[in-house]
Image: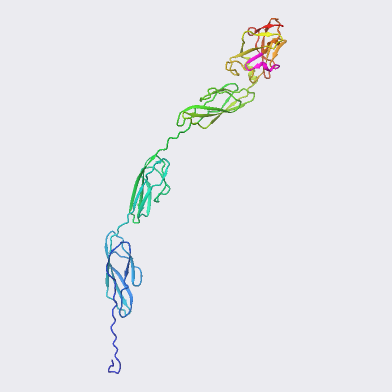
Amino acid sequence: MFNTEGGFNSTVPPNEKPVAVLGSDVSEIVADSQVTLDFSGSYDSDGTIETYTITQTDGDAVVLSGTGDTREYTAPKEDYAQDLVFKLIVKDDAGDSSEPVYITHSILAYVPIVPTIAASFSGTLTDGGTFTPTVEGDKYTSIAWTCTSGQSPTFDTATELLPDITVNEAGEHTFRVTATSVDGETAFSEFTVLVAALPAENTPPTANAGTDQSVAAGVTVQLDASSSTPGTNPIASYEWTQTAGDTVALEDETTATPTFESPVTTTAQRVSFDVIAIDTDGNRSAAAAVHIDVAAFETSALLKLLDTRRWELHHDGTVQAFEGRANREAFRFKLIPDDGVLNDADGFFRFDQPGIDSVEVLSSTSSSVSSTDDPDMIREVVIAARTGDLKGEDPNNLELTFVLYVTGDSDGLVMTASEMVPYQSASYFRR
């Protein structure tokens, strides 16, 4: 249009305000969920939208994040329902603002997550056994195992769903597993396991062979295992075994206190034994050892001992001698008292014991027989003298004298002679 002043008159149309669009109200929003506010539907018919201003006008405050035409927030996590109201104003490139619009988000009350757990065990156990329970669980973030009945079993892990559990005593065990959710809500399950005791162990006895001893030669020694202790069953017998030294004969060798005669030798020695205790069920102990140190036999001591004792001669009462013939007559002696020397079971003196050198039988100063010349003359407790080799002053009778020689002594010990005991006479038969 041309005006009166010779120009054109231009009319600029007025700016149209932008329109803010937030959409419809939203209901039943789950607490603690992520929520998006979308106002991308806002518009400006004659320009562009430059800014979006959105504010919360009601409800528990939330933090809005994001830029442009959307915002996000986390729905409040409360145990009550509530409405959150938001206001949106947009501004266009001409600087005009829209009318405000409102939107309501209805947030549900928060329902905590409650875990579920169920545990059981149906097997049988004995003390020391290990088992893995049967367990099913859901909505948990942590697990905790305990024994609530007072025992102290071992868990290979007490914070896993399926632990290996080792029991260490008999009795009824109650186990509890507790599941905890992300919200701290808990649930538990319990089950009971009956643990049987181990069968009674059949413990063998423990042998005790007694204390070591030091003894003289030729004495009675008593071993003593009476301090042995029974195991499950009483001790029924003992088994003694000699492991060192000259062989000896044990009397009452299946008892706790057998005896033996210590060896008689001119050198000291150690005699050792092992003993095993055996109970009524045949269980055997480990072997226990005892050592007996036996002193050397001293021939000088033997000579002194024999010189103070009395001898008693034994024969069959019909001693005969046949001149020039090799007949033998047997003589035995008892020493009274007889301790300190070796004797046989009947108490007769053993001429073959250590320290005895030889025996001589005399019928006169010029007629004798000796074990030095006749090794067969000494037969343990018997002097088997060749009486036919003897000659006496009496043509019809022999008067016998017995002389014992101890090692190292050349004088000899008269065992019986006419001036000590009645004559030992023999019927003498000449050729």
Q: Nearer the viewer, residue 21 or 257?
A: 21
Residue 383 appears in the rendering: yes
As drawn, 136 above or below 410: below
- Residue 168 belongs to the span the image colors magenta: no
Q: Nearer the viewer, residue 192 or 431?
A: 431
Q: Quadrant of residue 355?
A: top right
Q: Nearer the viewer, residue 408 or 207?
A: 207
As drawn, 186 above or below 38: above
Residue 298: percent from left, percent from top: 64, 21
Check the picture and name the quadrant holding the N terminus. bottom left
Q: Is residue 260 left or right of residue 424?
A: left
Q: Is residue 371 left or right of residue 198?
A: right
Q: Is residue 183 left or right of residue 164?
A: left
Residue 308: percent from left, percent from top: 62, 14
Q: Is residue 201 left or right of residue 358?
A: left
Count of marks, rendered view: 0
- Which residues fall within the magenta stretch? 372-384
Residue 225 appears in the rendering: no
Residue 163: percent from left, percent from top: 41, 48
The colour scheme used here is rainbow
As drawn, 370 above or below 231: above
As drawn, 209 above or below 395: below
Q: Quadrant of residue 47?
A: bottom left
Residue 68: percent from left, percent from top: 35, 72
Check the picture and name the quadrant holding the C terminus. top right
- Residue 373 belongs to the span the image colors magenta: yes
